[in-house]
Amino acid sequence: APAYHLILEGILILWIIRLLFSKTYKLQERSDLTEKASRSQVFYWEKEELIEEWQPEPLVPPLSKDHPSLNYDVVSGPPSHKIIVNGKECINFASFNFLGLLDNERVKQKALASLKKYGVGTCGPRGFYGTFDVHLELEERLAKFMRTEEAIIYSYGFATIASAIPAYSKRGDIVFVDEAACFSIQKGLQASRSFIKYFKHNDMEDLERLLKEQELEDQKNPRKARVTRRFIVVEGLYINTSDICPLPELVKLKYKYKVRIFLEESMSFGVLGEHGRGVTEHFGVNIDDIDLISANMENAVASIGGFCCGRSFVIDHQRLSGQGYCFSASLPPMLASAAIEALNIMEEDPEIFAILREKCKHVHKALQDIPGLKVVGEAFAPALHLQLEHSTSSRESDVRTLRSIIDYCLDRQIALTQARYLDKEERFLPPPSIRVVVTVEQTEEEIEKAASCIREAALAVLP
């Protein structure tokens, strides 16, 4: 045998002999053992006292009974053009019923006929006897309406983009996100466990700075760069700021830096563009330049749920990986039927979008120069924000002040609402605001009445 084998075997034999004859512990003197036992006994009683005194932290922070989240404005009847809030009929400037389809007779008749045919719900996800013929028809109609290859529907609007993002972006991938992105996008990013880089709101220079930095990082490790996917996630019309994303510039950056674009269009679908197709139609951008478009059907379409659309291979991936699609019960057939009829109306009467834009401009103009309040949002946005010009430096105080304005208007039959956020979970918490929602059903007289009422409320409430 080689010499090094013999040396190694000798070392092992000596080590085994040492283990066999060595003591695993040292004997202690009796006095040492007694002292140790005494110390242990003292420690035991101290531990017991600490356990008795310990109080667990509350599961949730304490809330006062007058907290806004615990006090509801109760609606009875449909939240259409006229809404009954706390027993009082008001003009509705609070519900996202942009096209007035929520109480449309044709939509209601289609939903009723579907209810009689299919029943109330589905009691199963799409892959487990939850796929009905109306679901397939709605997906086909949405794809046709948006002029994409394929569409997929979800049964819950919030879950649409929150499921779509983690279906594609995984651990190790990089997502560039506008810091004004809505909460459902934030939850999707959190579920993806990707590396998130936020850029300043609608600041394309800041976004390009981040993209350049990433390009330099990729050059240092080309092997990793080859397997790392990069995404830009933006909203078409931001719900928290009511302004529009600069889509043409985003598309240029997409091709320059080889990233994918996800576009969330819940506030712009059925609103922007000559035919209501959203931001791509508004800017004249080729829809094939956008990798994935998502939107909910809870605003302009006045139904429930959401959809994603794009190329077939992109959408088909969600049927296997979209958590909200795979594990939630599918959309009730009556709501799918209602959405199909809403699309019929949108296709038959494209003038409705021009009417909505004119109403938006009217509301935006009427809300200018209200003492103590500033209008936030584009003139064509159907949901504007009214923020305090001068904050009291206390968020709670600002919220109470805006609530007083809302209550003043409610007493005078104008229904408004506050924008609500989860203060401790929002990545970038927007300032408190009153949300003013525009619909095609509001008349010029009603718009002027609402603006006059808000002006009166500001003068009465603000110092």
Image (cartoon, helix red, strand yellow):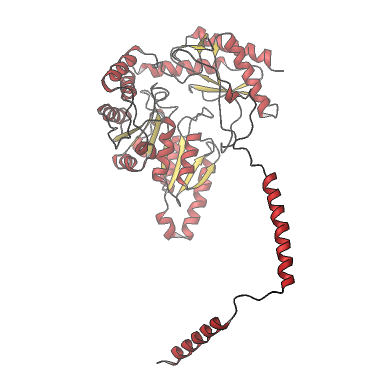
Left or right: 372 as drawn, with respect to 228: right
Q: In terms of image quadrants, where is residue 199?
A: top right
| In the image, residue 25 above or below residue 174 | below
Expressed as whole percent of the image width and height from the top left, the position of residue 101 reads 38, 16
Expressed as whole percent of the image width and height from the top left, the position of residue 372 reads 66, 19
Expressed as whole percent of the image width and height from the top left, the position of residue 56 reads 64, 42
Q: In terms of image quadrants, where is residue 119?
A: top left
| Residue 372, visible in the rendered structure | yes
| Residue 283, visible in the rendered structure | no
| In the image, residue 182 above or below residue 44 | above
Quarter of the picture holding the C terminus: top right
Q: In terms of image quadrants, where is residue 1?
A: bottom left
Q: Nearer the viewer, residue 344 or 359?
A: 344
How many dots with numbers?
Answer: 0
Q: Nearer the viewer, residue 5 or 193?
A: 5
The residue drawn where x is 64% and y is 11% is 456
| In the image, residue 169 above or below residue 109 | below
Expressed as whole percent of the image width and height from the top left, the position of residue 214 reads 49, 52
| In the image, residue 363 above or below residue 23 | above
Q: Nearer the viewer, residue 33 or 5?
A: 33
Left or right: 451 as drawn, with respect to 244: right
Left or right: 321 as drawn, with respect to 443: left
The residue drawn where x is 33% and y is 35% is 125
